[in-house]
Amino acid sequence: SGVFVGSVALDRTFKGDYFATISYLYNSGGSDVFFNAAQLTNIPLSAKNLMPFRHTFFAQASKNLSPIVNGSMSIMFSPAQRTLILFPALYLSISEDWDLAFIGQSFFAKENGSYGSQGQALYLRLRWSY
């Protein structure tokens, strides 16, 4: 208790099936210390700890490339150690009930006075909707 978490977001759909959103997340219990990719992906998440940073900015752009394919790029940034996370994604509707997603994550931050890559990951998700 004693932690305040708040966010604000704006989103917009544009002509040509483009969608964009920007948001800001404030976490009074957040930290400005360095987190590597392994630490970031293993944080216990809760409503009071959505991200470990005090300030987090998010932006996403997506486009329907065809009736069954959607591509997107998301960017998450925190001034803490200039942490940057990129999330490229490609979503495919392979049938009425099945979806396939390829989701990437690339982590960048300042560590020991040097800014650079902290790791990458690629995820494959197969989803059945009933």
Image: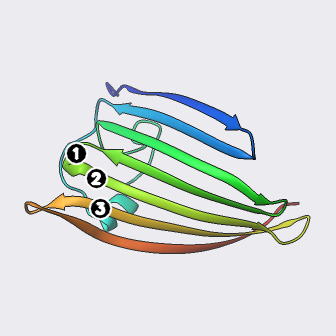
Residue 42 visible in the current orientation: no
Mark 3 = which residue?
108
Give percent across and percent down for residue 75.
Answer: 45, 51
Count of numbered circles on the image: 3
Q: Residue at x 38, y 45 (%)?
A: 51
SS under mark 3 = strand
Q: Are marks 2 and 1 in contact (CB under 8 Å)?
A: yes
Mark 1 = which residue?
80
Left or right? Give the position of 125 relative to 111: right
Instruction: Report the front residue among 128 and 9.
Output: 9
Label 2 or label 3, whichever comes before in sequence order: 2
Label 3 or label 1, whichever comes before in sequence order: 1
SS under mark 2 = strand
Considering every residue shown, the one lying at the far right of the view is 96
Q: Quadrant of the N terminus?
A: top left
What kind of residue is marked 1?
A: Ala
Instruction: Report the front residue among 38 and 66.
Output: 66
Q: Quadrant of the C terminus?
A: bottom right
Q: Label 2 vs label 3: CA separation?
A: 6 Å
* Marker disc for residue 43: none
Give percent across and percent down for residue 94.
Answer: 84, 72
Q: Residue at x 68, y 46 (%)?
A: 18
Q: Residue at x 35, y 47 (%)?
A: 77
What kind of residue is marked 3?
A: Phe
Residue 18 visible in the current orientation: yes
Mark 2 = which residue?
83
Q: Residue at x 70, y 38 (%)?
A: 14
Q: Label 3 vs label 1: CA separation?
A: 11 Å
Q: Are marks 2 and 3 in contact (CB under 8 Å)?
A: yes
Mark 2 neighbour density, 10 Å: few (under 14) some (14–19) many (20 or more): many
